[in-house]
Image (spheres, coloured by chain):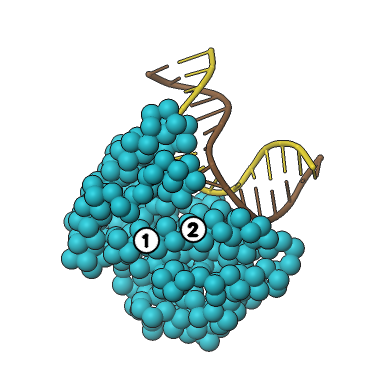
Chain colours: A cyan, B brown, C yellow
Amino acid sequence: MLRYLGYACVNEHLKPEKFKTCRLKSIETKGIEHLKEVVLHNLNFLEKIIRWNYQHQILFYRVSSDLIPLSTHPYVLEKQFFWKEDPDIQKILLRIKTAVKQYHMRISMHPDQYTVLNSFKEDVVRRSVEYLEFHADLLERLGGTDIILHVGGVYGDKEGAKERFIHEYKLLNSTIKGYLRIENDDKSYNIHDVIEISKETGVSVVFDYHHHRCHQDRELTAEDIKYIMTSWADIPKVHLSTGRTHEKDRSHHDYVTKADLDGLNTLLEGYAYDVMIEAKKKEMAVLELRDDETKDFNK
DNA sequence: TGAAGTCAAGGCGTG
DNA sequence: CACGCCTTGACTTCA
């Protein structure tokens, strides 16, 4: 049974208001205070989105990793910008967390492709762990629950690369492990690879239906689905998108078709789950699916 | 001011 | 080995 439908980061209705980001050069030119201004803007805007979501009964939302830009960058740390310790930042974070709890919202984050735990480069792995720590710290202060990660690179030896992921996973601290989940991707690690890693580590599996359509070695069995859905301590989270030009197009469509949601619902029949809708039109795609109307892709 | 180029970052395919 | 692309939208610089 489908519980929440959610969307990621951008809200189309609130445009042109948007999140800000920041280049190193701007911090060098304008000073570290500029970064704090950007962060305060972003947090205030996030609070606005959270309240908008509640008003529209969207109780599932992904927070952008860029909410606090360059948070783990050496230059920013050198300039003594510690967002966790800033009272102005803490104040808004607490307000958001209170709202999230009150509204019973599910909040997640999704570090980008540069977070690679199984890299051969020690520095890359170290920075990836630091970035995961940042995500865990922020999610804790927002009242969030999930960090979704892909497995990483293949390096011409998928088995070896899986082993390195498992090894690095086991070295993570328990706070990060408490938030981390891994997702099948559309090029390298299919759902069976992810299930295999989960069996070695106990990590929860995020099933991406569209990635699975684009990249799979074989069909999912009922046992596979049971494994995925019971790999979670709480309600499982799955991802859904529609291909832009055709079924196996990896680029996302503006919306998600009712047929795709129906397909996913059929596959997961008998389980409870939340669905993250990954569509270019963001929350509009969620509202449209929920309206249960005939879709019009030309609008 | 609108358009074009750039961005903090890793892997991968191509040449 | 060098380079452009992936993906993303906002930033930044340049006409």
Q: Residue at the spot x=44%, y=31% of the render?
A: A28
Q: Are marks 2 and 1 in contact (CB under 8 Å)?
A: no
Res. A30 image quadrant: top left
Q: Residue tagged by mark 2?
A: A130
Q: Which mark is residue A164?
A: none
Amino acid marked by disc 2:
Glu
**Are labels 2 and 1 on one chain?**
yes
Q: Position of residue A1 (x, y in %)?
A: 34, 78
Q: Position of residue B14 (x, y in %)?
A: 77, 45
Return the chain for callout 1.
A
Question: Dividing the image into 4 quarters, which one contains the C terminus of chain A?
Answer: top left
Q: Where is residue A12 in the image (x, y as percent from the top left)?
A: 32, 45
Q: Position of residue A23 (x, y in %)?
A: 46, 36
Q: Is residue A249 above or below residue A198?
A: above
Q: Residue A137 carries which label?
A: 1
Return the chain for callout 2.
A
